[in-house]
Amino acid sequence: MKKIKVHIQRAAGNEDIPLPRYMTGQSAGMDIAAAVRADEIILPGQRKKIPTGIAIALPEGYEAQIRPRSGLAVNNGITLLNSPGTIDADYRGEIALVIINHGEEPFVVKRGMRLAQMILQKICQGELVLTDELNSTPRGSGGFGHT
């Protein structure tokens, strides 16, 4: 498996927060932890911005996708609103998670709790070419529920 170097920086006061890490040898995503100062309670239907205490520098041509953790989703109804979130190669600010509680009970975010996962992905940029007509396909303009 190809590995790329990603520089990471902890925000001051977050030395106790574990750095993102792969939980198994073939994991696609690194778990990311919450860097809240005190417990944060997210009520059903409520959303909150949760800090991670880290910033990264990706190589040009890569992005980091931030995705929910399936266990939190199925067991507690906890997910990310902007999923997948994208961290661009030129962003240097702290990564934050927009957590929403779709569950029936309040959810407590604790310091160091694994809340999301980060997947590194190679990207390319498209060059748009304006045209008067697109080539045809058997599907055509069939959309939702078409197949």
Image (cartoon, helix red, strand yellow):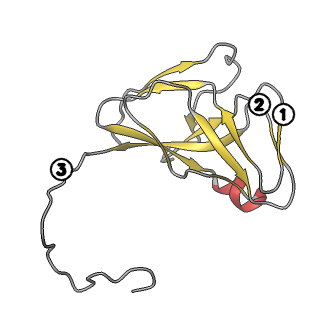
Q: Is residue 138 left or right of residue 31?
A: left
Earlier along the polypeptide chain: callout 1 or callout 2?
1
Quarter of the N terminus within the rendering: top left
As helix, strand or loop, the secondary structure at mark 1 comes to loop
State whether residue 119 is above or below residue 60: below
Q: Position of residue 120 (x, y in %)?
A: 42, 41
Cα distance in 3D space between marks 2 and 3: 43 Å
Label 2 with label 3: CB-CB less than 8 Å: no
Q: Is residue 147 visible?
A: no
Circle nearer the viewer, 2 or 3? 3
Q: Report the residue marked by disc 2.
A: 111
As displayed, is residue 146 above or below residue 116? below
Q: Can you tell which quarter of the image residue 57 is in?
A: top left
Q: Secondary structure at mark 2?
A: loop
Reading the image, the residue beneath label 1 is: 39
Side of 23 where 25 appears, left or right? left
Callout 3 environment at 10 Å: few (<14), some (14 to 19), or many (20+)? few
Which residue type carries mark 1?
Asp
Question: Outermost residue, top direction?
Answer: 12
Q: Amino acid at mark 2?
A: Arg
Residue topped by disc 3 = 127
